[in-house]
Amino acid sequence: MTTAERELGFGPAINEALRQEMRRDPTVIVMGEDVAGAAGRAHLGLVDAWGGPLRATRGLIQEFGPERVIDTPISEMAFVGAALGAAMTGLRPVVEIMFVDLIGVCYDQIINQAAKMHYMMGGQLEVPLLIRTTYGLRGDKRSYGGGAAAHHSQTLYAVLAHIPGLKVVVPSTAYNAKGLTIAAIRDNGPVVILEHRFLGLQAKGHVPEEPYTTPLGQAHVARPGSAVTLCGIGRTTHLCLEAADRLADEDIDAEVIDVLTLNPLDEATIVESVRRTHRLVIVDEDTPVASVARDIAARAADVAFEYLDAPVKTVTSVDAPVPFSAVLEAHYAPRVEQIVETVQAMVS
Amino acid sequence: MTSGDAERRLTGETLAWLYTTMSLIREFEERLKRLVEQGVPVGAVHYYTGQEAVAAGVCGALAPDDWIASTHRGHGHCIAKGVDVAAMMAELFGKATGTNRGKGGSMHVTDVTKGVLGVNPIVGAGVAHAVGAALSAKVRKTRQVAVAFFGDGAANIGTLHESLNMASIWQLPVIFVCENNGYAQATPAEYALSIKNVADRAAGYSMPGVIADGQDAIAVWEASQAAVERARSGGGPTLIECKTYRYYGHHQGDDPLRYRTIEEERLARERDCLLRFRERMRLTGPLTTVELDDIDRRTRGLIDEAVQFAKDSPLPSPDDLRTHVFVQDKAR
């Protein structure tokens, strides 16, 4: 198989990004709970027992050793804070918070410390810290029972995107996951990347073997169109693409924008699209109140109102905690048919 | 070691540095207090007055490229680590020439080139940063050590306990310095602590716990010196508890007599670190009263200049409001 044909899944693409950056720069370290697993058991021949929730860090310890691939105790306050301290003193740490639901216990280190350090110090020092975390629920593609409920399924990126100074990134494919991860590691400020746990084969695709960057702060037009703009974030980009296919059967030509970076938001790309299509639907797996979806809607209404032929619409999760039972969860998050129906109502 | 052994290693130069540092901190804080009372707007400030021996004793044992992470009561730590008092005063005045260009104020005043990782008013947060700096030193093999200053209030926050555990399992070159001044804002330490001595908690994290007299710069220096040597030689972390006292309220607007007595304050001031140092020099030398007076005169001059610099400095431009929100991209 040639490089041009090579395909990777979401987790392996992130793994390759981490591996290549660790080879390139000896100051890059990886730390978090079970980023390797079996810590201290090498004498029994047991290493690398886990590798993170997406297995994105699996195998790194064999190449880079326990000094650079550091399993932490369950101490998010201290290890996220320590990663920040290391970022302020010459390292370029990639710290993993296993589930975004866990940011509650280390929110101070993210929003008060990492996000604001550069500003509070008047620009005295750089903070090359990458926080990787996973988010999301299984959604309507599930073939078996309930998901993980309210403490292991949340989205929560709005509470990060709200904070000045923090770049917040949500990849959707193996290709952009690799490029965004490399760009985030090389960024000299704090970045949070949220990786969806259940992208599966949707995210698999061509990933070049050589290192490359996907710029932070730039949205991607995943499908060009002329009749309506659908904005997706992470997994909902795939829902938007599926909806666009169905709408095409009805001769409705939808453009799909993959937002990719929530802060700083690429407002220009979204507004440029809306000026052409005159309609905007934002599809967001997060809950609706004070959300990124409504922020995009407000910005579009503010700067492109005269171009709009219909009110901006959002399709979001229900304003409730994530439920457990499969039937409840299936009705909780955005579904393709909701997007299709929303667009049909806008164009009719 | 006995204190006699340690004292023999104390050079006259070190003793002069300890006194100069304490004198400079005292003068900075006393002058600041007068300015506040005159209505100069310097924001929220937490005077370090009374605790000078801790900052001086600890930082006197450090190398210039060692790191410290400080607390909301951080002026003393910054001064002891060598941060320019004029730039500090300008920062408190909110001036463009301040250490943080007027974006930080008292609770963030910092100069990273002097090894100060930040003054931090989120109690306990900076402790984790010191652990990270120690991890960085270990990974980069630089032989630097890091100090985490925290108070008796932070002794009860989770970040500290997580940090103590991590520093221990990774044997990091970090020194945890508890400044037990008796009060977390208006809450007495004996109420909030489940244990009499914070130092005793070190046992739970398999590291030495040392109690030092926080009103005695030489005692603090001695304890710090041993901990620094241990950390630098790969021996891992130490917890030092310095028993000390803050002379004023929690911040400039706080009346401490609502939660403590005048008698307690009077007794604490009898143990004043500067007076005790002078008494010790009078008995043992080598510094003479004339030399110590001369140091005080020079520190007053430095603070005069600092206040004048702060007053004369320009205010930041509103154009600076959104600079430094994100770290600007540049090629790596």
Image (cartoon, helix red, strand yellow):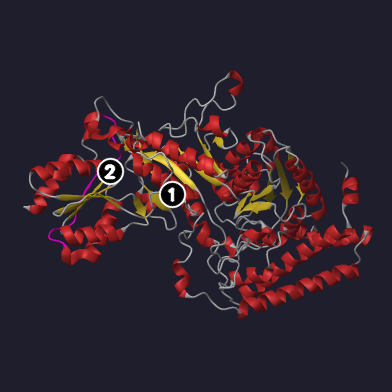
Instruction: Identify the residue at horizontal 24%, vertical 65% (top origin).
Output: A302
SS type, badge 2? loop
In the image, B283: left or right of B52?
Answer: right
Residue holding disc 1? A183
Tell me the subunit letter for badge 1: A
Tell me the subunit letter for badge 2: A
Instruction: Identify the residue at horizontal 52%, vertical 57% (top origin).
Output: A117
Give the label on residue B81, or none.
Answer: none
Residue A56 seen by the camera:
yes
Residue B216, x across and y down, in percent: 80, 54
Image quadrant where one finds the N terminus of chain A:
top left
Residue A330, x across and y down, in percent: 22, 34
Residue range in magenta is A308-325
SS type, badge 1? helix
Residue holding disc 2? A285
| Quadrant of the image occupied by residue A298 | bottom left
Total marks drawn? Answer: 2
Camera-side residue of B263 and B210:
B210
Badge 2: how crowded within 10 Å, few (<14), some, or many (20+)? many
Question: Which residue is outermost to the bottom?
Answer: B312
